[in-house]
């Protein structure tokens, strides 16, 4: 029912456009730093662990690059980044909207004839669905690139073997699969916190409770969506 109000026809499209641009910066560009840090260490750790585990075995060295590519593109970049953003973005959305609810700012919007759900939630959902795939693509490049740097400076494997591994048997649909998941994740980590924030009642204590519930439920839904889409798209 809430989403029905969110996606109803806006009163003035130009206002929504400006809000969407603001949310793209707040939810997307503002999350670029943490996305980059997590991606770099994620790719580096996967490379080190894989190289260490196959050292001295019959497994070819290029497996390190192949494993890093597959893990980063198919799972770590879309899913782990979504879980991190569920905490960062989700808690922010829930607390912001929840604070507006308990201070009666949402009631004031309704009295003025404004579609409060559309005005507060629609720009956030659209912004996340638009910008999160770009964050995930950046995460993919940084994760795989960090693995290459590890191959150069750690001495665990030849960089040429790593390059061969990340190009070996590459299936472009893997990137498409990851981006499809990202769109669904972006919708979940914005709409669920918005719901919890919008229906907050009480005072500041309840705002904190709503933020916590938003993060927990968003994370669970992300994992559930991950399983369902993997079952549908890869099997």
Image (cartoon, rainbow, N blue to C red):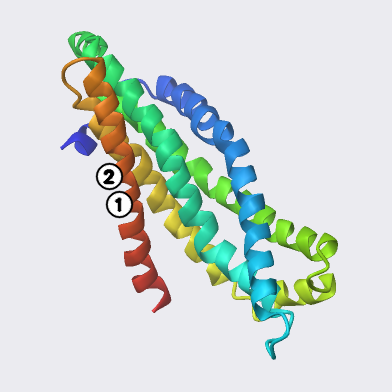
The quadrant of the image that shows the C terminus is bottom left
Q: Residue at x 40, y 41 (%)?
A: 86
Return the x and y of residue 154 as percentages of the image width and height: 81, 63
Residue 39 in the image: above or below residue 131 = below
- Please indicate whether residue 214 sits to the left or right of residue 71 in the image: left
Q: Residue at x 34, y 65 (%)?
A: 227
Q: Which residue corresponds to mark 2?
A: 217
Q: Is residue 195 visible?
A: yes
Residue 177 in the image: above or below residue 184 = below
Secondary-structure class at tag 2: helix
In the figure, residue 156 lies in which quadrant?
bottom right
The quadrant of the image that shows the N terminus is top left
Circles 2 and 1 in contact, beta carbons < 8 Å: yes
Return the x and y of residue 214 as percentages of the image width and height: 29, 37
Q: Is residue 6 visible?
A: no
Q: Nearer the viewer, residue 76 or 128?
A: 76
Q: Residue at x 41, y 38 (%)?
A: 87
In the figure, residue 73 lies in which quadrant?
bottom right
Secondary-structure class at tag 1: helix
For the residue carrying disc 1, how many other residues have a C-alpha within 10 Å: few (<14), some (14-19), or many (20+)?
Answer: some
- Please indicate whether residue 155 sits to the left or right of residue 181 in the image: right
Return the x and y of residue 79 as percentages of the image width and height: 46, 55
Give the Cα separation between the discs numbered 2 and 1.
6 Å
Q: Residue at x 79, y 58 (%)?
A: 149
For the residue carrying disc 2, how many other residues have a C-alpha within 10 Å: few (<14), some (14-19), or many (20+)?
Answer: some
Q: Which residue corresponds to mark 1?
A: 221
């Amino acid at each position: 029912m809430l989403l029905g109000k969110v996606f109803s026809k806006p009163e003035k499209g130009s206002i929504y456009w400006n809000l969407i641009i603001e949310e793209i910066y707040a939810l997307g560009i503002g999350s670029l730093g943490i996305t980059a840090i997590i991606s770099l260490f994620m790719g580096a750790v996967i490379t080190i662990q894989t190289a260490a585990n196959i050292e001295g075995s019959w497994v070819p060295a290029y497996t390190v690059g192949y494993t890093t590519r597959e893990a980063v593109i198919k799972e770590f970049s879309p899913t782990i980044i979504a879980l991190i953003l569920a905490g960062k973005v989700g808690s922010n959305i829930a607390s912001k909207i929840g604070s507006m609810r308990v201070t009666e700012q949402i009631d004031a919007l309704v009295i003025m004839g404004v579609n409060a759900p559309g005005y507060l939630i629609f720009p956030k959902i659209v912004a996340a669905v638009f910008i999160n795939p770009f964050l995930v693509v950046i995460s993919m490049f940084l994760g795989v690139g960090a693995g290459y740097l590890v191959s150069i400076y750690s001495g665990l494997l030849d960089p040429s073997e790593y390059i061969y591994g990340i190009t070996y048997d590459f299936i472009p649909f893997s990137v498409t699969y990851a981006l499809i998941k990202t769109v669904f994740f972006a919708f979940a980590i914005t709409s669920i916190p918005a719901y919890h924030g919008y229906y907050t009642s009480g005072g500041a204590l309840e705002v904190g409770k709503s933020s916590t519930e938003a993060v927990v439920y968003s994370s669970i839904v992300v994992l559930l969506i991950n399983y369902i889409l993997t079952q549908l798209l890869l099997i």
